[in-house]
């Protein structure tokens, strides 16, 4: 598949590229070569290959969700700079002071 200069200009316009005449000619040759190479894939016999969504088989590896004992609350909050009602107290990051 060979691209015309008009095709290259349209692609350059879509990509918001300003190309010189020499660059247009260079890209015409390079893009045509890439498309010719990709066209060779149509020659492959893929009738025995099932369609896939990934090149490598994917599977989730999940551990069982088992409830286990946690640390005591005193130990969890031991290094908290501020705490209130068994919770960390943090500085507010969203404030309505701008209104």
Image: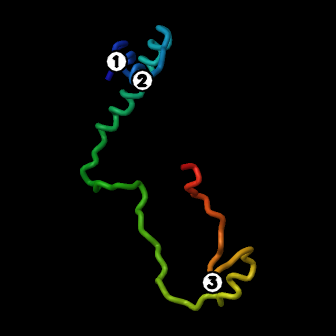
Q: Is residue 13 above or below residue 93?
A: above
Name the residue rendered at 45%, 12% in the picture: 25
Label 3 and label 2: CA atoms lie apart by 64 Å
**Closer to the N terminus: mark 3 or mark 1?**
1
Label 3 sits on residue: 86
Residue 13, position as x, y percentages in the image: 40, 19
Residue placed most toward the observer, 34 or 70 = 70
* For the residues bearing labels 1 and 2, Cβ distance under 8 angstroms: yes
Using the image, tell me which numbered label, if any, was put on residue 93: none
Q: Is residue 19 above or below residue 40?
A: above
**Closer to the N terminus: mark 1 or mark 2?**
1
Q: Is residue 98 left or right of residue 53?
A: right
10 Å neighbourhood of mark 2: few (<14), some, or many (≥20)?
some
Label 1 and label 2: CA atoms lie apart by 10 Å
Q: Is residue 17 left or right of residue 76?
A: left
Residue placed most toward the observer, 20 or 25 = 20
Using the image, tell me which numbered label, if any, was put on residue 7: 1
Name the residue rendered at 49%, 87% in the picture: 66
As helix, strand or loop, the secondary structure at mark 2 comes to: helix
Label 3 and label 1: CA atoms lie apart by 67 Å
Label 2 sits on residue: 31
Position of the N terminus by quadrant: top left
As helix, strand or loop, the secondary structure at mark 3 comes to: loop
The residue mark sitting in front, 3 or 2, is 3
Q: From this viewpoint, is residue 32 visible?
A: no
């Amino acid at each position: 598949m060979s691209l015309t200069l008009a095709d290259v200009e349209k692609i350059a316009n879509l990509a918001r590229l300003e190309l010189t005449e020499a660059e247009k000619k260079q890209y015409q040759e390079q893009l045509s070569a890439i498309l010719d190479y990709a066209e060779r894939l149509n020659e492959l016999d893929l009738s025995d290959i099932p369609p896939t969504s990934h090149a490598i088989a994917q599977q989730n590896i999940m551990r069982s969700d088992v409830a286990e004992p946690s640390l005591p609350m005193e130990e969890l909050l031991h290094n908290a700079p501020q705490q209130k009602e068994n919770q960390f107290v943090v500085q507010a990051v969203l404030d309505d002071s701008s209104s």
